[in-house]
Image (tube, grey):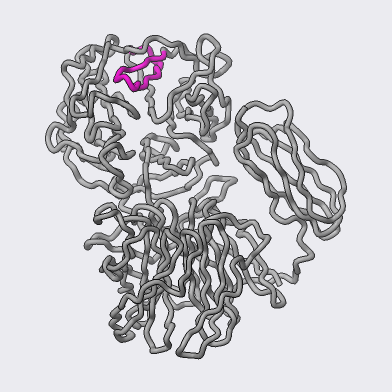
Amino acid sequence: MKLIVKIIILLFFQILSGQEVILPRNNTSIIINNDTLSNPFSRGFNRPLVQFIYWDNDNLLDLFISDSDFNIKYYEQDIANPELFVLRTRTFNDLIIGLWYRFVDYDSDGDQDLIHASIYPSDGGAFPLFVYENINGKLNFRTDKLLDFQGKPLTINSLVFPTFSDLDNDGLEDLFFGTIAGTVTQYKNLGLRDNLPLFRFETNTFENIMIVWTPARGNRHGANAIEFFDVDSDGDKDLFWGDIFQPSLFFLENIGTAENPDIRDTLMTFQYPLIDPIQTTGFNVARFADLDQDGDSELFVTVQSGIFGTELTNNFLYFENVGNAKSSKFQYKTNRFLRGLDLGSYSAPAFADIDADGDADLFIGNEFNERLAGLRGTVFFFRNSGGSDSTILVLEDSTFFPELTGNNLTPAFADLDQDGDLDAIIGDWNGKLYKYTNYGSPSSPIFEYKGEFLGVDVGGLSHPALDDLDQDGDIDLLVGSREGNIFYWENVGSFNSPEFNLVSDDLFKGEKIGRKTAPTIFDINRDGRKEIVIGTEGGKLFLAFKNEGIWDLKEFDNMPYAGSNIVPSLVDLKKNGTIEMILGSLNGGLEIIKVQMPLTVANLNKENKKIDNLMVSPNPFNSYLNLSFNLSTNSFVNISLFDLLGRNVDTILDETIDKGYYNFKVQPKYITSGIYIIKARIFSSIGSRILEKKIIYIK
């Protein structure tokens, strides 16, 4: 029997055809230090890069954020609270971008187009530029290799974040970026050629700027980000420079005019703002936006993490402008502007009613805590203090398991000794498991460390799950691993004296699940039998259920993008029959999903599959492409390659073939570097199906 699981995103749901957004009610709150988070399930940010623009003509600011996952998140400003932004989508325009992006009206038609870095460098090591044109609110791909005035690819070095600005008042925004020598490179904007922006190299020493920074360990420079903004409203734009060797911002005032800039490095301010300057781990990126439309702009700084350490949580700083447009006075307000839950990286949630009050409390392990000696990981405890119609998770303790010194901590809970309270098993980066026996009471736990559990070593990134998997009344053990194998230990002991026997070191052998598996066990359809939900490094989510005594594995094919290294945990928070799925991820936060009940069961067995998960590798590729799939019945199959404009650029397969497993190598013809869609269309006597995969070709 095949389970068909419907899911609803509680955080957002987007109807792609009309770009309409529906926000279902979400009565789950998270409180930290008496602060109720306004965006508790925004999933966290490690190295955010932001831009505020007016995108949709509603006179409210829109916020775009990229991170290390190559996507752009889109937030809209709340009409009642200008400091609140609501998430609309995590995959804006389905873009795949490189390390930076900038919205800029390159064709001067009054809307914002997009230019971004490629994911992969060209032969010289620098990164070419992608260009998208905005047509009626939709970004349309124009090129993956923007050419300069001489017809050469315009490229920018790694970890250099450029800006576009009009410093000569000609109505066209020139391209500027810093160099590792501490100078500024300028490309002059000449308008359009073939409906693409045309830039001509002007100089590597714009305004003869040379950033000299004595404390920066030998005047070194490296990764940097520059921004021009008229901070004093005198008609010209001033320069703000963030650097990997600078814990603050360099500020260079423009004392020239709108037509003739005069930016002297001899007048440079080494810290900014002048009062209460920024101090972070370095490589700061400045942005400005008038949040409250009072005529002056606020300052925002995102931290990319420089030589002074790693900052994966407090990395989106907000300074309110309490001065005025001509005399800005930036006052620090917060280092977490979006006010979301962010525990650094590799968040691993697990629910357990640890105080026996009838509701599920939340534990979250993480990779490391930058505020602890040795950068060891932490298991955070959030007590559920809500009522029957709401869930309120309050951070109370992060010292439940003080003996643990490892990283990537992954907790799991069960009453292993059947004494009426919950014990804990915790995995870590090394691949081992650690046991904590609860010697307290059901309502007041007291955990005692018992050392390594069962001598388990799965090779790295152990992720335990505890439950009665075989329905014999005792607790069994699953463990995910770095390489993707899921280990299964059956409990063959007595009711209150567990004894675990290794049954399999690869429960789903032969299935291509992916690496860094994170299993959890739950009776999703309430039929008394347990299912397994598995998260993976690549962001895929799988459901495993027993089909005539054999585990059947299916991928959630209607899942929206949920990030990488996802860790699922399922729970009925309000005890009303509605199952929520909480997802941890690489970014250190959480996402919440509602699993719609009742589940429907379709009378389809394994032999009725049309095609089993088209596999494409490598991705990106630069020569040959490996394709594999399985057919369970004779079918007509068409596999074609399309560009982002929807044009068919290559047909790989177009014929009727017999059932069976197919694995073959192809070399697409007549294509240039860029993003493509490979589409498989299958037609057979039992139905039809279309599968799509986004791939990147690097020439």
Q: Is residue 545 above or below residue 149?
A: below
Left or right: 81 in relation to 528: left
From the viewer's perspective, tell me whether residue 549 is left or right of residue 20: right
How many marks overall? 0
- Residue 24 in sight: no
The residue range painted magenta reads: 168-187
Q: Is residue 288 magenta?
A: no
The C terminus lies in quadrant: top right
The answer to whether any part of residue 196 appears in the image is yes
Residue 591: x and y in percent read 44, 58
The relative height of residue 613 versus residue 325 in the rendered view (above or below) is below
Q: Is residue 356 above or below residue 533?
A: below
> From what the image shows, is residue 414 above or below residue 339?
below
The image position of residue 234, as x and y in percent, is: 20, 19
Q: Position of residue 662 (x, y in %)?
A: 78, 50
Q: Residue furthest left?
A: 275
**Would you identify the image quadrant in which residue 527 lies?**
bottom right
Q: Is residue 185 magenta-colored?
A: yes
Is 91 on the left or on the right of 632, as rendered? left
- Name the residue rendered at 53%, 67% in the picture: 595
